[in-house]
Image (tube, rainbow, N blue to C red):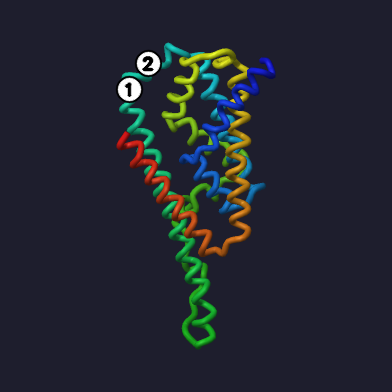
Amino acid sequence: MTLANLLLGFVIGFPMMIAVGPISVLLLDQGLQRGVRAAAPAALGVAAADLTLSFVAVVGGARLSELLAPISPVLTVLAVGTLVLLALGLARAALVELRESRVETLAPALATAGGPGIEASAVEPDGPQGRGFAHLQGGGLAAAFYGITLVHPLALVLLVSLVVAGGPGVGTGGWAFGMALASLVAHGGFVVLGGLLGSRLSPVANARLRLGAAVFMAGLAVHFALG
């Protein structure tokens, strides 16, 4: 592995990784939800998955491209289905937060007015999925994002295409590590951005931003479906 190949992978990979896609939206959401330090393992999981996919592309090369070409419609369907499920999960968690925020806002006013009062605990998320990945910590969160990145099939198709297109240094081990480094820097940036926004937004604004992220992800699904 040479430094030149590592830098080449970083230069090629960073613009790809910084583009706003489904994984970036999820990492932004994690930063909003739990802060930078607690959400950092998610970015590590994504970078590890990108390293794995890059090495698969390096090893598979042209042969893997030939195998993937006939099943590209199936891969697109899988990608769209994954995006829809993720968007629904984000939307569900955001709506739960909005409902809880309204209850917390109304409870003091009702209690002051002599009403029956409403406890915020009366609105509970329906199991761990009610808050997305909130029940996962540390290595579990990293593993979840590693898996999510791996099952997004279009990422592998893109990396294989880069390797097949070739060029000096592309498709080497150093290039693969450079792609992973680009992934860590770019996706870590989305976690930091989410953490900064989350520390400055009200709970209602936070939930609305997460709901907007869910709508954006659903839009990505439509985009992929329409080709």
Q: With 145 as the anchor, is 72 left or right in this view?
A: left
Q: Residue at x 35, y 36 (%)?
A: 224
Is residue 181 positioned above or below 212 on the image?
above
Q: Which corner quadrant holds the C terminus?
A: top left
Q: Residue at x 51, y 77 (%)?
A: 107
Secondary structure state at the residue bearing disc 1: helix
- Disc 2 target residue: 67
Tell me, yes or no, whether the two marked residues, 1 and 2, touch with CB atoms within 8 Å. Answer: yes
Number of marks in picture = 2
Q: Residue at x 34, y 25 (%)?
A: 72
Is residue 209 positioned above or below 168 on the image?
below
Q: With 107 as the anchor, is 87 left or right in this view?
A: left
Q: With 185 as the anchor, is 207 left or right in this view?
A: left
Q: Residue at x 45, y 25 (%)?
A: 158
Please tell me how crowded label 1 is: few (under 14), some (14-19), or many (20+) other residues with Cα within 10 Å. few
Residue 96: which quarter of the image? bottom left
Secondary structure state at the residue bearing disc 2: helix
Q: CA distance from mark 1 to mark 2?
A: 8 Å
- Which amino acid type is marked by label 1? Ile
Q: Residue furthest right?
A: 3
Q: Where is residue 160 shown, x and y percent of the image?
A: 46, 20
- Disc 1 target residue: 71
Q: Residue furthest bottom?
A: 114
